[in-house]
Amino acid sequence: MVKINMPTRRAKDFTGSLAFKVFLASIAATVTASLTGQAIARSDADRVFTVSNYPVQAEAANAVKAKEEAIADGQKAAFRSLLKRLVPVSAYSRLNEIKKAETRSLADGFVVRSERNSTTEYLASLDFAFRPDAVRDLLQRENVPFIEEQAPEVVLVAAVREKGELARSGSVEKAWRDIWGDLDLKNTLTPLKLEAIKPVIHEDTLNMLLTGDESANRVMASEYGGVKVIAAIAEIDKPAGRIHVTLAGQDAVGPFNLKRSYRVYDDDVGYAMELAAVVSLGILEGRWKAVKARKYGGVAAMAAGGEPVRMQVEFQGLADWNSLRAKVLDTQGISDVRIDAVSARSADMQVTYPGGGSALANVFAARGLTLQNIGGNWYLRSSY
């Protein structure tokens, strides 16, 4: 049996040092709301602009100063984490300057989940919210491509194998599950519902997942109510000083099987497991962003400066016009919307979009809209 200490550090993101001290077990203090005394209210569409359960820590000459520094530094780090969430991996190089932006004008408050302090130190777990429109404007102004559409929720089963067998209990199994539960699984681009491994899931099913046998996906889906299921299977290899993690099953993109290994430094198994969970969540987000970017014409097209598209909008009446206009305004990447000459059945509209009319036509098609180029002029209408 492998004994594990809960992590004393958190792998927050890949913009700073991973040696960030955080308490996980002792932080179970009374949860309180900060700033306004209420939880941050967010629509589902804007949920991804909140970074939840983010650890902050600072030491200073006194408790007040330590708290101020922890929150200020935490807000900056949470913003960098948000950028990594929204921007495709292949465009990370574009973030070198934008992640230095002043976050106070982008912030939309925070909530304290738990906190602890001494006379010189402050530690807490916070939810940081950022203003969606301000973040969008910043990214678009700098021609940084981003994805904000969340994938459908997928069930995540965090499982552990010890000595080649499924471990249904024990300190390692509990730690692996708790580490996943401590991540921001709700606001991520790829929402996950953490579930325990069910007694009906046998060793052979797990082995099938590990070997990439897609029939195991059907078994898992059946046992978890017909939904898509991803298993994050961790194996501790003490002789090699590594943790092997296999992501197997079916996420919002489709079936896949990926194994990665993480080195255990200074016998800190908990920290290595935490890093593995953070990277694994990033992999799931990366798959989703890659698919969505292709839908929008690719990262290069998304990053290019927008092209003006002037179109005549055709509709059946006021309700149709309102519905169509709302879909246009809600389309990611559209900017500089101008509406002219609205009549009972048509309107002139101009928008700016990366890739121009051809790229926009593909995006509109997925939203139930038809954009056609007829004789050099663009015409937009509902597809049904």
Image (cartoon, helix red, strand yellow):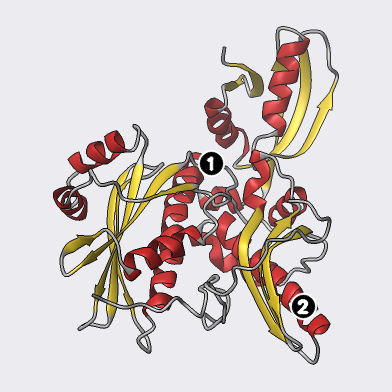
Left-right relation of 249 to 22: left
Measured as percent of width and height from the top left, residue 101 is found at 75, 68
Disc ID at residue 67: 2
Residue at 57 percent of width and 27 percent of height? 367
Disc ID at residue 353: none
| Farthest bottom residue in view | 61
Q: Is residue 326 above or below residue 153?
A: above
Measured as percent of width and height from the top left, residue 240 is found at 22, 82
Q: Amino acid at mark 2?
A: Lys
Residue nearer the viewer, 326 or 178: 178
How far, Cα to Cα, is label 2 from label 1? 42 Å
Left-right relation of 18 to 310: left
- How many dots with numbers? 2
Q: Which residue is mark 1?
A: 296
Residue nearer the viewer, 376 or 147: 147
Measured as percent of width and height from the top left, residue 335 is found at 73, 41
Q: Quadrant of residue 149?
A: top right
